[in-house]
Amino acid sequence: MGTFFHAVAVFGDELASVRWQFLAIALTLHFLRLCLRGVAWRVILRASYPAETLRLLSVFGAYMAGVGVNSIAPARAGDVVKLYLVKHRMRHGSYATLAPTLLAETLLDMFLAGGLIIWALAIGVLPTHQVYSRLPSVDWGFFLEYERETEIGLALLAGALVIGAIAYAEHGGASRARIARGFAILRSPRRFLWGVLVPQGLSWVLRLASIVYFLHAFRVHASIHNALLALVVDSLSTLFPATPGGAGTKQGLIVFLFRGRGIPSTLLLAFSVGMNIATVAFNVLVGGLAMYRMARTLSWRRLQAARAQEQA
């Protein structure tokens, strides 16, 4: 975390040179990207519940509330908020069906993020294990240090999953039907293409465009190649999430990936921290407003507890 706090200090030093007009454009593109994500999720929900009337504003509000919580809370707590809020805008919603809709909503993300990492490997910019282990705040260091204990733990986890899968296959017919209903959109290829893949594809274009403008805002050379490298850093930090938002690891990675490109490390650190602060603050503000409007509370823990009581 020391590198992260150093990067925050660097960001403070560079704050006077931020080009605010580009920052505003970047956040506008970020907001439009989230709008498209909400549109895609609504299509998935309507495929699972064709008899329900789901207003776009309600789905978008639930989605934004979840994004806001995920920006500051660990373990995807915002997904619980999304499910709770959207379920209470439906007459016959089931968490067993709603939860898989979030997985269906991320299928393209997993494919594109994987493609980005393969691209970074192909051009040789990703660090080797030896280099990565020396980056600050390595999130997997504990598991690498205790390899045998980790192997035993993974073996026990795999055994438990196998046992659970067998029990579920034998006795979980009703549950399987509810879960399968959450993936109903996949049984309509045309609707999945135009209603989900196209908006999500456009959201990725807007995500890349917003990073280009973030680069402009912090006076880093704003090429498509550099924006793609920044996307790779985001994808990798998501894979190693021991610190909030990959703090520390993300800053170490961005300096490494941009090596040899003639960009001062101070600018890279200011860009990395500045983009994080701006997007998190924006997500929390818009998400908080959405959550208060829909649930009359700003406590995401209260919504999590309410959902737990409903499932009990």
Image (spheres, rainbow, N blue to C red):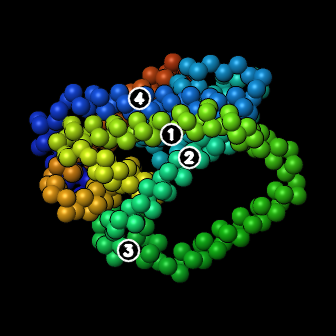
List x then y, in percent, for residue 304. Answer: 59, 37
Residue 312 visible (yes or no) = no
The correct choice, above or below, for 116 with respect to 47 in the image is below
Residue at (24% x, 44% y) in the render: 222
Residue named by callout 3:
129
Residue at (14% x, 55% y) in the render: 264
- Mark 2 near mark 1, Cβ–Cβ under 8 Å? yes
Residue named by callout 2:
108
Distance between the alpha carbons at the discs numbered 2 and 3? 27 Å
List x then y, in percent, for residue 309. Answer: 69, 36
Sequence-wise, the earlier of marks 2 and 3 is 2
* Amino acid at dot 3: His
Label 4 sits on a secondary structure element that is: helix
The correct choice, above or below, for 202 with respect to 162 in the image is above
Res 96 quadrant in image: top right
For the C terminus, the quadrant is top right
Distance between the alpha carbons at the discs numbered 2 and 1? 8 Å
Tag of residue 201:
1
Bin the neighbour count of mark 4 within 10 Å (Cα to Cα): few under 14, some 14-19, many 20 and up.
many
